[in-house]
Amino acid sequence: MNTIVESATSHTVRANGIRQHYFDAGSGPAVVLLHGFPETNYAWRYQIPVLAQQYRVIAPDLRGYGETDKPASGYDKRNMAQDLVALLDHLAIDKIALVGHDRGARVATRFAKDHAARLDRLVVLDNVPTRVVAQNLNPQTARAYWFFLFHLVPDLPEVLIQGREAQWLQHFFTDWCYNPHAISGEAFDTYVRAYQRPGAVRGAMADYRANAEDVQQDLVDAEVKIACPTMAIWGENFYAVGEMFDMKAVWEGMASNLRAEPIAQCGHLPQEEQPERVNALLLDFLKGWKG
């Protein structure tokens, strides 16, 4: 039994050429949870025990994060979606409900477009699609998305962050959350240890450095809307998402069957800042998913 996330067991498999780590909990129709930055699959610690009462929950560490391999390449979202396909094939899971936050939502969006037959319904948390960010880059958005640009610089972020992982993460967790103390204590220490692992900062940077390729992939099928039921959740109080973009309009441009759910008194990490609200929304949206 895994001691970090209640009710989940830890596993590793080789799939799509890398060693992937994932949490597995519960039984029934499969629900996959994809974390974002600056987190790992530990971000879903409040969702896994609740969802596992009705579903089989699979929560991988994305390529470059946590205890999954951190290779030098392969971070474009099409290939990261292929990481998930290979994991599902290994587990003999054909069709899923998919939940993605932040970077994980970018992988989930690409999965929805590239592998629509394997997706029953989609949830995206606090994410402005990569193409939309790029198309709206101006002085205001550049200030809010400064880390997008900083993380693109080769090698320098790794040098500056090494040995200061706690200070680096503390900035994001305090700046991005409605309650600046939302990620603290054991949770904060768990993330610090994860990003102190060899290659962990480089892996996260590689995810961002695939941005140009991600935008090109997204432009090719920009007019193709996600057809399956989609729910967009976002925190009303994050300056770079809910306060900067009309999120309902953004996701209406992405999905033809949309449910929009803003969350009050919440920043960029809804699943950790407002877990009970997120759990209620997920359980309601997943009704009818029988596998």
Image: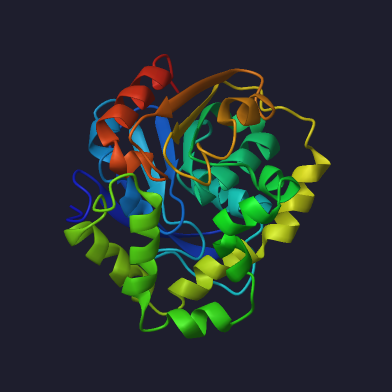
Specify the quadrant of the image occupied by residue 131: top right
- Judged from this view, the residue extending furthest toward the top is 288
Task: Name the foreground residue: 259 vs 88.
Answer: 259
Q: Nearer the viewer, residue 34 or 164?
A: 164
Q: How is the image coloured?
A: rainbow
Q: Is residue 260 above or below residue 171?
A: above
Which quadrant holds residue 47?
top left
Residue drawn 74% across the image and 59% down it: 212
Q: How many labels does the image show?
A: 0
Residue pictured at 44% horizontal, 79% vertical: 161
Residue at image position (31%, 63%) is 191
Q: Which is more toward the observer, 64 or 281?
A: 281
Q: Is residue 197 visible?
A: yes
Q: Is residue 12 above or below residue 237?
A: below
Q: Is residue 260 found left or right of 46 in the rendered image?
A: right
Quarter placement of the C terminus: top left
How far across and how far down the image is residue 121, in percent? 52, 25
Q: Where is residue 154 in the image (x, y as percent from the top left)?
A: 64, 79
Q: Which residue is drawn at 53% across and 47% down?
A: 240
Please indicate, yes or no, whether residue 25 appears anywhere in the rendered image: no
Residue at the front extreme of this rendering: 139
Q: Quadrant of residue 20?
A: bottom left
Q: Does residue 140 appear to the left or right of 277 in the view shown?
A: right
Q: Position of residue 104 (x, y in %)?
A: 51, 48
Residue 56, x across and y down, in percent: 34, 34
Q: Is residue 65 above or below residue 60?
A: below
